[in-house]
Amino acid sequence: MTVVEFGKALQVAQTPIPGMIVLELPVHGDARGWFKENWQREKMTALGLPDFGPVQNNISFNDAVGTTRGIHAEPWDKWVSVATGRIFGAWVDLREGPSFGTVFTTELDPSRAIFVPRGVGNSYQTLAPDTAYTYLVNDHWSPEASYSFLNLADETADISWPIPLADVEISEKDKKHPRLADVTPIAPRKTLVVGANGQLGRALRAELGDAAHLEYATRADLDLADPDLSTARRWRDYGTIINAGAYTAVDLAETAEGRRDAWIANAEGPARLARIAAENGITLVHVSSDYVFDGTADRPYREDDALAPLGVYGQSKAAGDVAVATAPRHYILRTSWVIGEGRNFVRTMASLAERGVDPAVVSDQVGRLTFASEIARATVHLLSSGAPYGTYNVTNSGDPMSWADVARTVFRIVGHDPARVSAVSTADYFAGASAPVAPRPAYSVLDTTRLEQTGFVPREAAAMLKDYLVS
C-alpha cells in the first residue's frame, strides 16, 4: 500500500547536481484516495523549474519490490514522479564538465518529484510493490540520439542501494554497463552560428572557439531559404542558434532583385529559424539593425520604441525582428554601424588617407560604431549570464559621432591631417546617383541601458577604433 504525505506546500530544493531540482508536491486526499497536480507549468516555472517543453509521457510499471533499473543518461530533460508506490532514486551527472560524476540520491513517492536535466544518469529501485514510475520528456526517442550509461555497482559513484544489488532483479544489459572511468560523457547541446563567413561570424568564432559542440555554417552549409530547413538538422541536439547572417547591401535592396534577396535573408530566413527554435526549445540569437527606426528621435532609441523603417533593408530587418520575437527563448541584438574584419568604412578611410585621397564624408548621419567583436562579446555575455530573453541594444560606448567625425578620427589615428576630410550632406553626397539609393536614418544612437543592467560594460568606441587600426 502506498503511503502518501498529505498537506505539503509546493516547494523546490536544489541538489548537488547543477540544474537538478527536487519538488515537494501538494497531495490532497481523504478516505476515497488522493489527488495531485503532477505537472503544473505556471506554478512550477515560477519557482524556478525550467520551462522544458515536454512532448511525451512515459510510465514504467514494476510489480515487485527491489526491481532496479540501470543508470541511463539520455540527451533530453525528464520530469520524474511516482504515480503509485515508492522508489529509491539515484542520479549521476554524466555530462561533460566539472560536475561529471556527482551523485544524488533520494526517495520519491507521489508527494515528491524531481527534474532531471539532459545528460544526468537516471536510475531507481522500487521500495513498494506495484510501483508506477512516470516521466515526462522533451524529445522523442531517436536512434540517432547519443546516450551514456553507468554500471549500477560503480565503485566511484558508490551508491548505497537499500536492497543489495545481488538480491534484486537487474537486466543483463544493465549489468554490463561501464564503470565511471570508461563512460562517454554527454556533450553539451550544440551551438550553431549561421553566417560564419561574415564579419560577425568570424568575430563569433574568435570569441567562442572551436569546441566539438560548436558548429559554424555558411550559406553553402545551411540555406535559410531552403523549405526543408526544419529537417536539415536533428534540431533537438541544438541548444543555441546564433543568426549572424544578413543581407546588408542597403542600396541594392531597393532594386527588384535586391528587394527579393533582402526579404529572404532578413525576414523569411529568421522566421524559419524562429519556428525551429520554438519547436525544439532552442535559444535563438538574432542580430538586428538601427535601420528598423526612421532616425527622427531626439534621444537615443530604446528597445521598446516603435519600429519605423524607411527603406527595404530596414523593413526586411524589422520583419525579421518581429518573427524572431515569436520564439520563446530569443535575444535580438539591435546594433549600428558595424565594423569587423574585411572591407568596411574604417578600412576604406584608412586606405584613402594613405593614398592621399581627400574624401567628402556625410556629416548629417549620427550614431555610434559597433565593433563585431563587441557584438560577439555581448552575445556570449547574454547567453552565459542567463539574462532575460528579449531585445537588447548593443553598441560601443562613447559620444555619438557623424560619419565625417569617424573619418577624421581614422585619419588622425593613422597619422594624417583630419582636415583633409570635408563634410557633405546626405542629399548632396547622393545627388545625381544613377542607381537606387536607400533612405538612411539620420539619427542612429541606441540606448544601451538595458544591456548594461545585465552586467555588461560596453567598451569605448574611440579606444577600440585605435586598437583596430594600429593592431
Image (spheres, rainbow, N blue to C red):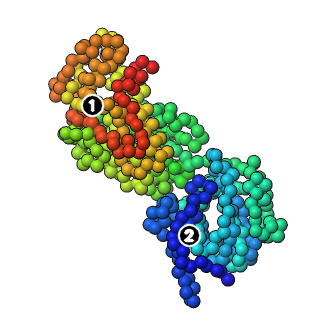
Q: Find residue 108 and report its horizontal and vertical position in percent.
A: 64, 70
Rounded to the nearest whole Å, what is the CA distance between mark 2 and mark 1? 54 Å
Q: Label 1 sits on what residue type? A: Pro
Question: Between 324 and 256, which is closer to the camera in this rendering?
Answer: 324
Secondary structure type for disc 2: strand
Secondary structure type for disc 1: loop
Question: Residue at image x 29%, y 39%?
Answer: 446
Question: Between 440 and 391, which is closer to the camera in this rendering?
Answer: 391
Q: Judge whether 423 appears above or below 91 on screen.
A: above
Q: Is residue 172 left or right of residue 41?
A: right
Q: Find residue 410 and report its horizontal and vertical position in percent.
A: 33, 19
Q: Label 2 sits on what residue type? A: Glu
Q: Which residue is mark 2?
A: 24
Question: Residue at image x 56%, y 79%?
Answer: 6
Q: Find residue 72 and report its horizontal and vertical position in percent.
A: 68, 59
Q: Is residue 201 left or right of residue 308?
A: right
Instruction: Point out the frontmost of discs 2 and 1.
Output: 2
Task: Pick out the residue farthest to the right.
Answer: 166
The numbered dot on residue 400 is: 1
Question: Residue at image x 43%, y 48%?
Answer: 387
The numbered dot on residue 56 is: none
Give neighbour class at mark 2: few <14, some 14-19, many 20+ (Cα, 10 Å): some
Task: Pick out the residue farthest to the bottom.
Answer: 31
Q: Does residue 432 appear in this view?
A: no
Question: Residue at image x 55%, y 83%?
Answer: 29
Q: Quadrant of residue 209?
A: top right
Question: Between 20 and 231, which is closer to the camera in this rendering?
Answer: 20
Q: Quadrant of residue 247?
A: top left
Quadrant including the N terminus: bottom right
